[in-house]
Amino acid sequence: MRLRVVSMSKKKQNKPHGHYCHVCGQHKANEKFSGKGHAAHICKSCSSLSPAERAAMITVRKIEDMAFRQLNEAEIKWLRKHLNDPRPEIRESALSVHRHKFPHYERNADKKGLIIHSLELYIHADVWDEYGDEIPVHARIFANRDGALRLIDYSLPENDQEKAVTIPKHIAQKLLKAFIHELNTPFWDTDLSDSEAGSSDPFLDILPEYYDFDADLEDESDCDSGKAPNEKEPVCYLKLELNAGKIKEITFYNQLHEEPQSMFWTLMDFFNPIELDEE
Ligand SMILES: [Zn+2]
């Protein structure tokens, strides 16, 4: 798609199929233009709009035309300026085009200055380890920026479930920072799907063409499909305490994605320090 250049100079002759309206961007038959509208390239319906409405339409079209072509620096600046436009229709189209062109821009802006003060991770599911084995896990881990880590392993006998370790503050802060920047933890609720379809294999959720739909249908009778989501046991629950005491809770009932599993093993390493072989 190319940005159309509006020329207010001479009308092009020999254009039998009407006119291009530079406000709505549509090519319309001659009778859709008034005498004056022909010259100004504004169709009758657009000429009944107020100048402000017309200006807004032209801006929205200009923004939408930017979606699928290369932008120069001035155009990027112009587009970003409209992310905060007071007119909602312009702001929304600028946001959607900008998100399409620069998918990481907003995310990076959102991450900037974001801090996890503490977290609580609960997992009740089979978790893949680095060797490709599925390990049944039923545990809750707490961690904070001061370096206090606490594990409750529900699979152990009741008086042996809790374990606490303290790690250096700077390690804890590095760890929680990595959860933001590498695992995108505060954005799991929007980034990671929790649809039931993918529950058979958490690693295939982005590749729906690999779903075994027949298997899903066969399974339907004996799975808990009749339950409302809130009656289901979560497979994963995460609570984050972010900047300014903001609490974020994210719950997965169906899918345990790679990211929470990675967080789980990373945290578990502190409870079970690996003896390094000196090979
Ligand atoms: Zn028009």
Image (cartoon, grey):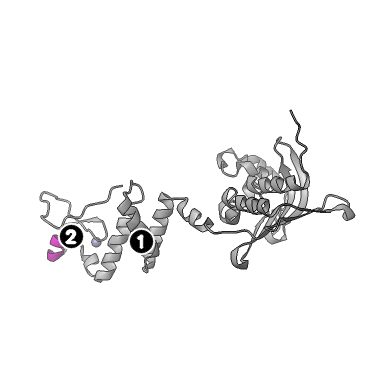
* Marked residue nearer the N-terminal end (2 or 1): 2
Q: Which mark is residue 217?
A: none
Q: Position of residue 145 (x, y in %)?
A: 67, 58
Q: Residues within 10 Å of mark 2 (few under 14, many from 20)?
A: many
User: Which residue corresponds to the image point at 70% horizontal and 37% vertical from the top-left?
Assistant: 130
Q: Quadrant of the C terminus?
A: top right
Q: Which residue is painted at 39% across and 63% down in the image? A: 91
On the image, which quarter does residue 277 sit in? top right
Is residue 253 rendered to the left or right of residue 32? Answer: right
User: Looking at the image, is 256 positioned above or below residue 55?
Assistant: above
Question: Observer-nearest residue: 117 or 279?
Answer: 279
Quadrant containing ligand 1: bottom left
Please tell me whether the stretch drawn in magenta is mainly helix, strand or loop: helix
Residue indicated by mark 1: 81
Helix, strand, or loop for circle 2?
A: loop
Can see residue 263?
yes
Provide residue 247's location: percent of width, then percent of height: 63, 65
Residue for point 63% across, 42% down: 203
Question: Magenta span covers which residues?
Answer: 35-40
Residue position for label 2: 41
Q: Is residue 96 left or right of residue 164?
A: left
Q: Label 2 is placed on what type of residue?
A: His
Q: Tag 1, which secondary structure?
A: helix
